[in-house]
């Protein structure tokens, strides 16, 4: 039976802050959610400090870094201001993501091909500061090979297009998108990159993608926070962990 590395679960707590900011004030606190997520089995915490601070705020990042014992993955746009904050907070990892003011959430991966010149100094500075750099990209060969050339040690494959097609019952498109992810994960491993995945995942899509042995981490936020409203965060995370473990077991059998 093939050995496959444990699949890590990174829990994104952005939308706890979204709910808090709807009223102002301090509750619900994303740091409390992060501690509870770790207690329930999360392997790390992800949070996106957006330029407009629409959910996570600067002091949330500082409090998260101080409070949690597991790795903090700081999602950020490649801007001077974000670089300064990241180098001050020193998270375990920084995931560079595209950011447009109009979008509700991150739509699609970074333009690594067109943006190589812009991204290279950010990747180098973060690496010099002792931060692991991840690039949030589309599961396309050229983008993945460009990420490797930029010397980012980690990529996170954008799973949103697949999840969207899957949810909408577009079987043929979902299958085509899933095969892109399969090929992307293999390309990443062959290029020596650590491969993560995320965006739009739910219990079923997480179970399916867990069967890909090249992927070692999933980052999941919005779905888990929505589920937590109904069943509580520990149960939502336990169910997700079980789904991921079931998918990984299928990979080990094949």
Image (cartoon, rainbow, N blue to C red):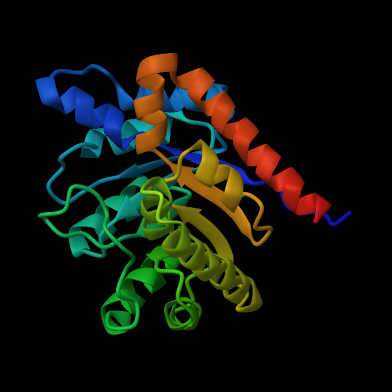
Considering the image in quadrants, where does the N terminus appear? bottom right
Which quarter of the picture shows residue 227? top left
Residue at x 49%, y 26% (from the top left corner): 37
Residue at x 34%, y 27% (from the top left corner): 226
Which quarter of the picture shows residue 138? bottom left
The relative height of residue 147 versus residue 40 in the rendered view (above or below) is below
Image location of residue 143, percent across then percent down: 42, 78
Name the residue nearer the viewer: 155 or 177.
177
Find the residue positioned furthest to the right: 1
Considering the image in quadrants, where does the C terminus appear? bottom right
The relative height of residue 200 versus residue 140 in the rendered view (above or below) is above
Q: Is residue 15 left or right of residue 201?
A: left
Q: Is residue 98 left or right of residue 90?
A: left
Residue at x 64%, y 31% (from the top left corner): 242
Image location of residue 213, percent across then percent down: 69, 58
Name the residue nearer the viewer: 147 or 205.
205
Image location of residue 214, percent across then percent down: 65, 62
The relative height of residue 225 versus residue 150 in the rendered view (above or below) is above
Name the residue nearer the viewer: 101 or 167.
167
How many numbered marks does the figure carry? 0
Q: Is residue 174 left or right of residue 207?
A: left
User: From where the camera sits, is residue 109 visible?
Assistant: yes
User: From where the camera sits, is residue 133 visible?
Assistant: no
Residue at x 55%, y 22% (from the top left corner): 39
Image location of residue 25, percent across then percent down: 14, 18
The relative height of residue 73 versus residue 157 in the rendered view (above or below) is above
Name the residue nearer the viewer: 156 or 63.
156
């Amino acid at each position: 039976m093939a050995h496959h590395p444990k699949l890590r679960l990174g829990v994104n707590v952005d939308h706890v802050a979204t709910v808090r900011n709807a009223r102002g004030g301090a509750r619900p606190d994303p740091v409390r959610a992060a501690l509870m997520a770790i207690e329930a089995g999360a392997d790390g915490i992800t949070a996106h400090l957006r330029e407009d601070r629409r959910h996570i705020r600067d002091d949330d990042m500082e409090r998260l870094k101080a409070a949690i014992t597991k790795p903090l993955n700081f999602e950020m746009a490649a801007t001077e201001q974000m670089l300064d904050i990241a180098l001050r907070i020193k998270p375990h990892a920084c995931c560079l993501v595209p950011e447009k003011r109009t979008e509700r959430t991150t739509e699609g991966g970074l333009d690594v091909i067109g943006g190589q010149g812009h991204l290279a100094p950010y990747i180098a500075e973060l690496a010099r500061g002792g931060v692991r750099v991840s690039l949030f990209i589309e599961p396309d060969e050229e983008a993945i090979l460009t990420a490797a050339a930029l010397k980012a040690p980690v990529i996170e494959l954008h799973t949103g297009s697949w999840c969207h097609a899957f949810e909408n019952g577009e079987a043929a498109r979902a299958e085509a998108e899933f095969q892109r992810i399969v090929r992307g994960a293999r390309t990443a491993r062959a290029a020596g990159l650590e491969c993560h995945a995320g965006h739009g995942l739910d219990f079923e899509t997480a179970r399916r993608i867990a069967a890909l042995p090249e992927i070692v981490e999933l980052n999941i936020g919005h779905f888990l926070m929505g589920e937590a409203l109904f069943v509580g965060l520990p149960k939502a995370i336990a169910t997700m962990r079980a789904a991921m473990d079931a998918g990984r077991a299928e990979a080990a059998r094949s």
